């Protein structure tokens, strides 16, 4: 089902994000985890790009395998950074040929060590431009990213919302948010999104914490905050990954319960290719 057709009923749709593993063993393990999670009937699995599009070929290969061999609905990430317009068009033609019609259009992270984002000399500068170009093909349904704590490169929330509106007006069907650990960030963000007359669904992104070290590393990369009470709890599990994982399940479950009570249309889980925690949350929620 295309993204623009989802989130229109009383049913809450879940989706699950994956990343391309670096080894064949990792790929095999990822597909085993997908089989476990597919029991919960996710609306789609999404496959990420590496920073600066470094895993493009692997991302496309795994997206193809998910869609056409595993037979699960698949959304592919597509970034602007590090790619020419011709390379992006080649990717779009590949996805169309493989029957993958959902994608999330992103600017993408600059290469590690880079001072900041620099567009490809023959590419697009913004995700907005990519959305507009993809829309011209009249085939894909497009998601874009939203940032409850604002994009790291935005001057303020107002400018961030302004740019979000430009992405939606360019043709985006859905907004999927960056992770957050305090639902107040999401509600404040959603309120501002609606005040800006952005009407497409806004789907919260949820990360079940797997370890104290992992979540600190992950939030440092995406510039999300760890609330003081969460940091205090993580301090108890510095050398206890199992305790941290149980705490992560409990926290994610409480977040989801509150979000569902307040009428969200879907939940997007950052699984980090691990089924256990997402599965536990979905079971506890009654999916």
Image (cartoon, rainbow, N blue to C red):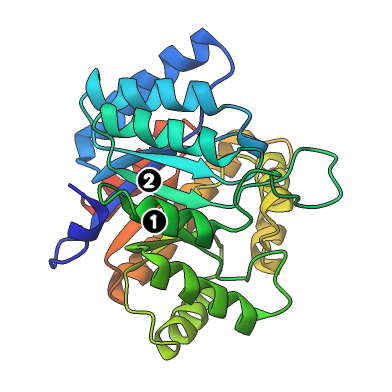
Residue 65 versus residue 217: which sits nearer the camera?
Answer: 65
Q: Is residue 196 left or right of residue 98?
A: right
Of the residues under marks 2 and 1, which one precedes in the sequence? 2
Give coordinates of residue 163: x percent, y percent.
Answer: 56, 73
Residue farthest to the top, as pictured? 24
Residue 243 versus residue 119: which sits nearer the camera?
Answer: 119
Residue 251 is marked as: none
SS category of the residue bearing label 2: strand
Disc 2 to disc 1, how far (Cα)? 6 Å
What residue lies at 66% left-to-right and 60% top-to-bottom? Answer: 224
Q: In this view, does 287 lie to the left or right of 137?
A: left
Q: Name the residue under label 1.
A: 143
What residue lies at 46% left-to-right and 16% top-to-bottom? Answer: 27
Q: Do the residues labelled 2 and 1 touch (CB within 8 Å)?
A: yes
SS category of the residue bearing label 1: strand
Residue 185 versus residue 96: which sits nearer the camera?
Answer: 96
Please identify the quarter of the rendering in which residue 76 is found.
top left
Q: Name the residue under label 2.
A: 103
Above or below, comparing residue 145 to residue 198 in the picture: above
């Amino acid at each position: 089902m295309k993204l623009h057709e989802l989130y229109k009923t009383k049913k809450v749709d879940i989706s699950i994000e994956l990343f391309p593993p670096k080894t064949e063993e990792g790929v095999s393990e990822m597909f085993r985890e997908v089989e476990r999670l597919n029991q919960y009937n996710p609306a789609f699995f999404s496959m990420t790009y590496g920073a600066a599009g470094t895993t493009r070929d692997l991302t496309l290969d795994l997206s193809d395998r998910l869609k056409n061999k595993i037979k699960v609905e698949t959304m592919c990430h597509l970034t602007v950074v590090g790619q020419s317009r011709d390379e992006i068009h080649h990717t779009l033609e590949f996805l169309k040929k493989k029957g993958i019609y959902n994608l999330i259009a992103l600017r993408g992270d600059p290469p590690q060590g880079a001072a900041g984002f620099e567009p490809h000399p023959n590419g697009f500068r913004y995700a907005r431009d990519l959305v507009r170009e993809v829309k011209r093909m009249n085939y894909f349904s497009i998601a874009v990213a939203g940032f409850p704590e604002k994009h790291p490169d935005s001057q303020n929330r107002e400018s961030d919302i302004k740019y979000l509106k430009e992405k939606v007006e360019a043709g985006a069907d859905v907004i999927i948010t960056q992770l957050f650990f305090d639902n107040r960030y999401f509600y404040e963000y959603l309120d501002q999104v609606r005040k800006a007359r952005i009407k497409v669904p806004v789907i919260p992104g949820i990360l079940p914490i797997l370890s104290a070290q992992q979540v600190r590393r992950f939030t440092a990369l995406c510039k999300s905050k760890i609330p003081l009470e969460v940091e205090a709890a993580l301090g108890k599990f510095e050398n206890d990954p199992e305790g941290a994982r149980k705490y992560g399940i409990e926290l994610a479950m409480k977040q989801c319960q509150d979000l569902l009570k307040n009428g969200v249309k879907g939940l997007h889980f950052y699984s980090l290719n691990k089924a256990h925690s997402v599965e536990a949350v979905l079971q506890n929620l009654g999916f």
